[in-house]
Amino acid sequence: MSYSITLTTSDAQKFQFNCNGDQNVQEAAEIAGFFPPALCKVGSCGSCLAVCQQGDYELKSYSDGVLPPNFKTTGDTLLCRLYPKSDLKIQAPYGSDQIQTHQPIAREATIIELEQIADRTMKLVLQLKEDEEQGLGFEFEPGQFVELEVVNLALKRAYSIANTPNWEGRLEFLIRLQEKGQFSSYLQSSAKIGDVLKIHGPSGTFILQAQSLKPRCFVAGGTGLAPFLSMLKRMAEWGEDHPTHLFIGVNSEQEIFCRQKLTEIEESLPQLKVTLCVWNASDKWQGFKGTPADALGDYLKQTKQLPDLYLCGPPKLVEIAINIALERGINSADIYCERFT
Ligand code: FES
């Protein structure tokens, strides 16, 4: 049985296609020649999140914390796990410019910097190779990610870009070193300056909501800071003056990184306040003790104007921060998330 699917983007563009009952909506869209944002395609990253406004469907298994806690009332769903049982009307949280009409072509880039900058955090900088059409340029929205592929090891992982688009072809990343992680082990043991990686993307809908005039709250767990560095740099480049508060959390003082960079960004954005949170802090730590979700809760108790909330980090942190925000009255439509998977 085939059903009609209407996917409407935030700029009111409609994408219509058919989907069989034994097909998921993401798959059907791609067969029809549309590529809505999606990364894992198995229900574990949340990048294909959308809201089903009308129709019956089955939502197949997905990872904990990927959907917001109130998804049954809001209709939040995952296109890659969504199997129709009737015609569906779906609202996408992104504009039509995020729906590709072809699979982006992979580019090549060379490692030009590789440095461990804190306990369990690596900074990786790549230099894109020149492309016939785009030269050294690489278009993306601050907040988006790319997949990095080490071809000879058949390894592919997604990481947020930590700088802004530039004509030099420079791409910066902050990478959490995972125990037993294959990409982490590549970076620590065999990666070297001059290695060539493949870049797939950009992808992702975790981007600044330019039309909103509300203050902005950014909550980052560890290397979840990367997309916020890109967004803050963009705000400085474009002279955006939204009052903004960044809460960044690490487990211990040894894990703190990018302090100098944050100071420079604070100097270029006078309306920005940064709160560095250490969970297992020593007695010497003078700053906030606790998680960035705790710090967000304190902030929301005393703020007069509720902000747009942007969350990036481990699923558990994102889930706790969402619950705090909903309790304090932030509308779920004003919460934007990127979860590590
Ligand atoms: S692409 Fe659907 S959850 Fe990852």
Image (cartoon, rainbow, N blue to C red):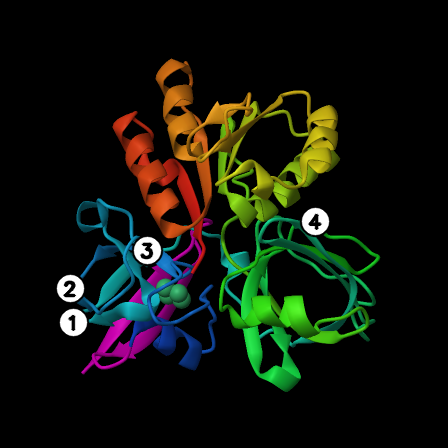
Question: In the rendered image, which quarter is residue 192 located in?
Answer: bottom right
Query: Which sits in the foreground, 36 or 189?
Result: 189
CA–CA distance in space, label 1 to label 4: 43 Å
CA–CA distance in space, label 4 to label 2: 42 Å
CA–CA distance in space, label 2 to label 3: 21 Å
Mark 2 or mark 3, which is nearer to you?
A: 3
* 2 and 1 marks in contact (CB < 8 Å): yes
CA–CA distance in space, label 4 to label 3: 26 Å
Span of residues in magenta: 1-23
> Height in image: 69 above or below 178?
above
Check disc 1 and give the amino acid type: Lys
* Disc assigned to residue 56: 2
* 2 and 3 marks in contact (CB < 8 Å): no
Residue 63 horizontal/vertical position (percent): 29, 62
Check disc 2 and give the amino acid type: Asp
The residue that disc 3 covers is: 66
* 3 and 1 marks in contact (CB < 8 Å): no
* Residue at the (38%, 43%) spot, across then down: 317
Residue 203 horizontal/vertical position (percent): 55, 62
Mark 4 or mark 2, which is nearer to you?
A: 4
Mark 4: C-beta under 8 Å from nearest atom of ligand 1: no
The residue that disc 4 covers is: 163
Residue 333 horizontal/vertical position (percent): 35, 39
CA–CA distance in space, label 2 to label 1: 5 Å
Mark 3: C-beta under 8 Å from nearest atom of ligand 1: yes
Which mark sits nearer the N-terminus, 3 or 1?
3
* Residue at the (65%, 45%) spot, across then down: 230
